[in-house]
Image (cartoon, helix red, strand yellow):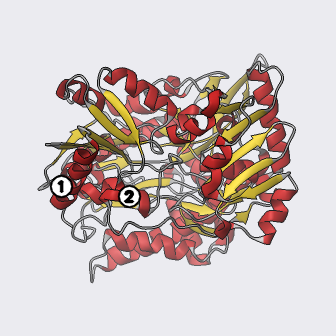
Amino acid sequence: MTIAEKLIRSRQFLKINRFNALIVPLTDPHFNEYIQERYKSVEWLSGFGGSAATLLVSSHSAFLWSDSRYFIEGERQLKGSTIQFMRSGAPGVPSLMEWLSENLREGGRVAIDSSLISVVDYREWSGELAPIELILCNDPFDYIWQGRSALFHSQAYTMPLELAGERAASKIERLWKEVEGRHSLGSGTLFYLLSACDEIAWLCNIRGEDLPYNPLLYSYMLLEKGGESTLFLSQESVTTHLLSHLEESSIKVEEYVTVEEKIASLPANVTVIAPLRRTSMKLYSAAAKGGRRVIDDTKIIVSHMKAQKNSVEIEGFRLAMVKDGVAWVRVLIELERRVKKGEEPIYESEVASLFFQKRSLDREYRSESFAPIVAFGANGAMPHYSFDNGAPNAIGERGFLLIDTGAQYMHGTTDTTRTLYMGSPTRKEILDYTMVLRGMINLSSAIFPQGSRGASLDILARGEVYKRGVAYLHGTGHGVGHHLCVHEGPQSIRREENPTPLQEGMVLSNEPALYREGEYGIRVENLLHCTSWEGEEHSTFLNFETLTLVPIELKCVDFGLLGKERIEWIDHYHQKVYNGLSPYLEEIEKQWLALKCAPVATLDRD
C-alpha cells in the first residue's frame, strides 16, 4: 500500500467511528523507546523512521511532530507525501494540542489508543483540548494495518548476583520501604503495579531480547505488600532456570496477556500504587474498576533506585568500557588503513559493520545499544542521522566524520561519540571543534554540591558552543542503564529543568555538540560516573569519573584556546585510556594507541 492508500484507510476508520482525528504516538503499551515492528504504526503510515514522533490524521490533513534531532531528516523523509512535518518547539510551529484546539470545533472527537497514552498525558491533554473530546479507543491499527506483525517474545535470561550486585528480593524489600516512607496508606491490602519493562528487568534481575538494542522483555509486574509478586510474561520467554531464579524472591509468573484481567479482578477494597506517567489508560481503567483507590507514585521509585548503581554495577561499566575501547581501537586502525590506502571508497555503513564485527569477538557482547550513527560531512548535521535512508554515502578525502555508537555487554552498556577529521581542517572547523571539546572537558571536570540538578551544570558544556554563535537543541547528558536502556531516566543534563538531583552512583552521558546544516556536525561524548568528592572543609561534594576509554581526535584542536588545565585533563585522560586498553591489544595496536595518547606537548601542531 502507498502512503496515500494508508491514509485513505485511516480516514475510513475515522468515518466509521465518527471521529474527527486520530492521534498516533510512536510508542508501545510500555512506553519503550525502541519498539517491535507491530507498534511501528507511525513509520508504516508515514515513512518516518525516527525514534520520537507523534502523527495526527484528520479527515482532510495529516501532520507529524518530531524534535530537533530529526528536523532535517524528518522533512526529507516526508517529502512528496501529503503529511506535513512539524518542527516541535520551533518558533511559530503550533504544538499538537494547539493545532487541534485551533482547527476542531467544540464537540470535536479525537481518538487515541487507550494502551498508548499514559494516565498523566491523558489528563493533561483532555484538559487542554476541552471542549473537544479526547476519546479512548481500542487499537485502531487492528483495522487499518492489514498484514500487521504479531508480537514476538524472546527467551529470558538472568543477571546473576556477581553481575547485578543485589538480589531481587532485596530490591523489592527496598521498594516497599520507599513506598511506606512516601505514602500514608493506612490498613488494607496494598499492591504496586509496574508497566516499564526496564524497571521490571532491573527489579527482577532478568533480561531478554524482545526489543531492538534494549535487553528487555515485554512484561508487567504486580507486587503485593507482604505477599507474593506476580510477573506477567509470555510463556515463550519462560525457562526452568528463570522460574528457579524468580522463586528465590517469591515471584511467580503468569501469562503476559492476562494482566488486564488479573488487575480488574482484584478485590474492590485494595489500594493500587502505580507510576501514572508510565501506566497506560487501558491498564489504569482495569486498576480503578469498581472504585478501587489508585495512587500515583509521582517519584517513580523503581526508576530512582535503578539510577543509582551499586559498586558491582559500576565495576561492570568499567569492564564494558575496556571491552568497547578495544573494539574502537581496532575499528579506528582499520578505518585509517582503508582511508590511507585510498584504492576503493569506504562507506558509512561499512564503518558501522566494523564495530559489530570487532565487538562480536567478545563473548560477553550481546548487541548494539542503539542504531549506530556514522555520518560524514553534511550528514553529521543531523543528530540522529541514519545511513540506511538514501543512497550509500562514501567517506570523502576531507571533512568531519561523526561516529556515535554503543554496545550491550553483560557487564554494562556503552555509548561513545568521536568526531574524526579526514584531511586538513579549516580555521572555522578548528574553532568549532575546539569549543565542543572545551565544553566536554568543562563538564567532565565539574565539582558541585550535593543536590545539584543537571540544568545547573548544562551551561558548562553548552556555553562553550554558544561562543561560536550556535546552539544545539538536544540534551547534553542522559542517564545510562546497567546492561539496560542506553537512554535512562530520571537523571539528565539539559537546559530544561529536571527536579531530579544528580546523585552518587548515577551514570550519564556527556555529549556537547555543534551542527552547521548542510556542512557538518561535531559531537564528542564520554560516559560519566557521578561520585563523591570531599572538599577542604570536609563537606561532601560530587564530581565525575570518566568511564569511556577511547582516544580523542586532536587534529582539529587549537591548543592555545584549550588552555593549560584542559590540556592537562586530556593528557591524564589519554594516559588512563592507554593504561586501560593496552594489556588487551596486540603489539602493533599498542603502538598505534601510544601515538594517539601521546602527551599534547609532544605533538606536531603545525
- Please state which of residues 255 and 299 is positioned toward the viewer in this rendering: 255
Alpha-carbon distance for marks 2 and 1? 15 Å
Q: Position of residue 54 (x, y in %)?
A: 33, 43
* Residues packed near mark 2 inside 10 Å, few (<14), some (14 to 19) or many (20 plus): few
- Give amino acid for label 2: Asp
- Give amino acid for label 1: Ile
Q: Position of residue 115 (x, y in %)?
A: 48, 45
Q: Position of residue 255 (x, y in %)?
A: 67, 59
Residue that appears at 17% across and 61% down: 5
Residue 124 occupies which quadrant of the picture?
A: top left
Which SS class for mark 1?
A: helix
* Residues packed near mark 1 inside 10 Å, few (<14), some (14 to 19) or many (20 plus): some
Number of dots carrying numbers: 2
Q: Is residue 440 visible?
A: yes
Q: Is residue 588 above or below residue 462?
A: below
Q: Position of residue 184 (x, y in %)?
A: 77, 18
Residue annotated with mark 1? 8
Q: Is residue 62 above or below residue 535?
A: below
Image quarter where the N terminus lies is: bottom left
Instruction: Return the disc, 2 or 1, that comes first in the chain's sequence.
Output: 1
Residue 390 occupies which quadrant of the picture?
A: bottom left
Which SS class for mark 2?
A: helix
Residue 431 occupies which quadrant of the picture?
A: top left
- Please state which of residues 296 and 356 is positioned toward the viewer in this rendering: 296
Q: Residue furthest bottom?
A: 343
Left or right, residue 265 beside residue 244: left
Residue that appears at 61% across and 34% down: 289
Q: State the mark number for residue 142.
A: 2
